[in-house]
């Protein structure tokens, strides 16, 4: 395995960065628009030559090495598959380009397609694949190149919210023992995929450290904003997360979780609906809460629940000002928060959850019906 060192000064973009990624480590690069994330990727990929600096991968200086010879694969927001080639030939292209003969290249491609769950789609052309399937093929193609460094540029950004979580889980296993750098706007990607986070602002690194630590005690404004995810720590019981209070949360969990594992459920406040009483309809978790405070955030209002904050539970929903008025939301009002299981990521935390906090309700599977007010 190979570690990465990069230093890049790009004067006309006011970017000046120095960064190391250890062998086998995944680093998430976060930052607002214009922070320099794409510039960093371009320098690594060999598409942009810095005014000063160097890229060293596995002890090998890459300065002057063209993009295809760097041992770096890029997984972009769009799959960028060749439209006239089958999924299999798209994946086989990478080993073929390295001089592997056709037969072995195609067997390797089959193996990689199987490994990312789309082996049965090998004969299809890209136009016959869904967005999520095409992105899996793109993952297989990136891996088939056997890169020393994998770059991921907002790999989930173009996917429907329904398929993004499954791809994120796939990437989690793909990245487990790889040297990788993922550029993302999404704190879920950082939490679930990365060992370490680097926050860029104005072309400089303003903060870095272990992902959990940066998000728990953010020092930059950007990291603080990112840290506003809903979070419920608990224990995996084989089917759902059970919080110390007895609160249960269903979600998308890793396949290799075992009952008794310490886990946390993570979801976005924007995926939480607020209802006057429990909603029906598609499968969703719901819990009755007391409104704590309301904070305007652009065209939305963040509604925070008071429940279990002491036990590390963070529950908030982003709703429209119209919904605030319609539901009469104000501190002390009782409402129901609901979130679809498909929008909840359950991941192992390796830390026992805090036992013995007070009970404040249970996320349940849906009960019948009344109409959603702020469901999205
Ligand atoms: N092709 C270019 N030529 C000159 N300046 C550029 C070019 N692309 C970006 N910049 C500038 O370089 C700086 C860094 O931009 P960069 O695209 O790397 O940021 P980013 O973090 O990737 O942003 P985003 O999240 O919007 O993609 C910005 O000031 C931007 O305006």
Image (cartoon, rainbow, N blue to C red):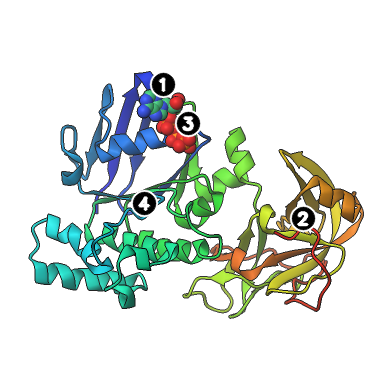
Is the C-beta of the residue carrying label 2 under 8 Å from the nearest atom of ligand 1?
no
Labelled disc at residue 14: 1
Residue located beneath label 3 in the image: 35
The C terminus, quarter of image: bottom right
Q: Report helix, strand or loop for mark 1.
A: loop
The mark that comes first in sequence, 1 or 3, is 1
Is the C-beta of the residue carrying label 3 under 8 Å from the nearest atom of ligand 1?
yes
Q: Which residue is pictured at 10% across the width and 67% down the height?
A: 102
Is the C-beta of the residue carrying label 1 under 8 Å from the nearest atom of ligand 1?
yes
Residue located beneath label 2 in the image: 310
Q: Position of residue 321 (x, y in %)?
A: 81, 45
Q: CA distance from mark 2 to mark 4?
A: 33 Å
Residue located beneath label 4 in the image: 25
Q: Position of residue 100 (x, y in %)?
A: 9, 62
Q: Report helix, strand or loop for mark 3.
A: loop
From the viewer's side, name the closer residue of 315 and 161.
161
């Amino acid at each position: 395995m190979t570690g990465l060192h990069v230093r890049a000064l790009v004067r006309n973009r006011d970017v000046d960065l120095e960064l190391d990624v250890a062998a086998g480590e995944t680093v998430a690069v976060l930052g607002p628009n214009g922070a320099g994330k794409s510039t960093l990727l371009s320098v690594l990929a060999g598409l942009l030559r810095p005014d000063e600096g160097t890229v060293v991968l596995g002890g090998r200086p890459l300065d002057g090495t063209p993009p295809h010879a760097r041992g770096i694969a890029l997984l972009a927001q769009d799959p960028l598959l060749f439209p006239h080639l089958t999924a299999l030939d798209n994946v086989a292209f990478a080993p073929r380009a390295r001089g592997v003969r056709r037969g072995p290249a195609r067997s390797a491609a089959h193996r990689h397609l199987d490994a990312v769950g789309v082996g049965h789609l090998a004969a299809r052309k890209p136009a016959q694949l869904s967005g999520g399937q095409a992105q899996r093929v793109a993952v297989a193609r990136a891996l088939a190149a056997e890169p020393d460094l994998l770059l991921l540029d907002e790999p989930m950004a173009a996917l429907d919210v329904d398929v993004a979580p499954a791809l994120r889980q796939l990437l989690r296993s793909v990245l487990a023992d790889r040297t990788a750098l993922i550029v993302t706007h999404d704190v879920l990607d950082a939490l679930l995929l990365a060992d370490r986070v680097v926050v860029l602002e104005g072309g400089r690194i303003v903060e870095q450290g272990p992902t959990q630590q940066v998000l728990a005690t953010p020092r930059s404004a950007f990291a603080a904003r990112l840290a506003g995810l809903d979070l419920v720590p608990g224990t995996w019981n084989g089917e759902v997360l059970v919080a110390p209070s007895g609160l249960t949360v269903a979600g998308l969990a890793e396949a290799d979780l075992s009952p008794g594992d310490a886990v946390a459920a993570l979801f976005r406040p924007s995926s939480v609906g607020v209802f006057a009483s429990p909603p029906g309809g598609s499968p969703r978790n719901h819990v009755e809460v007391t409104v704590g405070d309301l904070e305007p955030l652009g065209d939305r209002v963040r509604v925070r629940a008071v429940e279990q904050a002491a036990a590390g539970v963070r529950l908030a929903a982003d709703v429209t000002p119209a919904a605030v008025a319609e539901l009469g939301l104000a501190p002390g009002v009782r409402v129901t928060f609901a979130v679809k299981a498909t929008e909840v990521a359950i991941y192992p935390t390796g830390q026992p959850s805090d036992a013995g906090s007070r009970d404040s309700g249970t996320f349940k599977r849906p009960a019948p019906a009344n109409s959603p007010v702020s469901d999205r």
